[in-house]
Amino acid sequence: MTGLAEVEQTAEVDTAFTILLHEVAREEAPRLFALVEEYGEPEDVRVAGYGLAYTDRADVNSVEGDFPLKSQDVERARTLFEISSRSAGVHQVHVVWLDETTAVAHQG
């Protein structure tokens, strides 16, 4: 094999390997979500924390940074945030998936 052919083959292998690395990383990446508290009127909301959902657990941190939480799943993390914030007047905590795009239609 000539030097140029070896370089081209190495470049093709490197490109294929790089593509494989990116595919594996994307497939195994945790999903990003927010826990949003609802209090008062329905439009009275605030982000309470952000988390990463793995296949076997969910890790969440409050926006203040004083309430890190490891949970079995996202729903249990949501429930724990809801219980811990009830004394502050929170009615409900919602999970908002940040890796999904949502379109809201406004009609006038």
Image: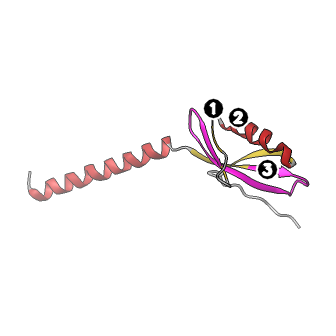
Count neighbours of disc 1 (C-alpha within 10 A) and say few if under 14, some if 14 to 19, many if 20 or more. Answer: some
Q: Amino acid at mark 3?
A: Glu
Q: Which residue is mark 3?
A: 37
Q: Which residues are magenta?
A: 36-61
Q: Are marks 3 and 1 in contact (CB under 8 Å)?
A: no
Secondary element at tag 1: loop
Mark 3 or mark 1, earlier in chain? 3
Q: Secondary structure at mark 2?
A: helix
Distance CA(mark 2)–CA(mark 1): 7 Å
Q: Which amino acid type is marked by label 2?
A: Arg
Q: Dividing the picture into quarters, in which one does residue 58 lie?
A: top right
The picture places residue 65, in percent across and down from the top left corner, at: 64, 52
Cα distance, mark 2 to mark 3? 15 Å
Screen quadrant of the C terminus: bottom right
Identify the amino acid type marked 1: Gln
For marks 2 and 3, the one nearer the N-term is: 3
Residue 72's label in the rendered image is 1
Q: Which residue was labeled with disc 2?
A: 76
Q: Is residue 96 above or below residue 76?
A: below
Residue 57 in the magenta stretch? The answer is yes
- Circles 2 and 1: CB atoms closer than 8 Å: yes
Q: Determine which quarter of the picture holds residue 87.
A: top right
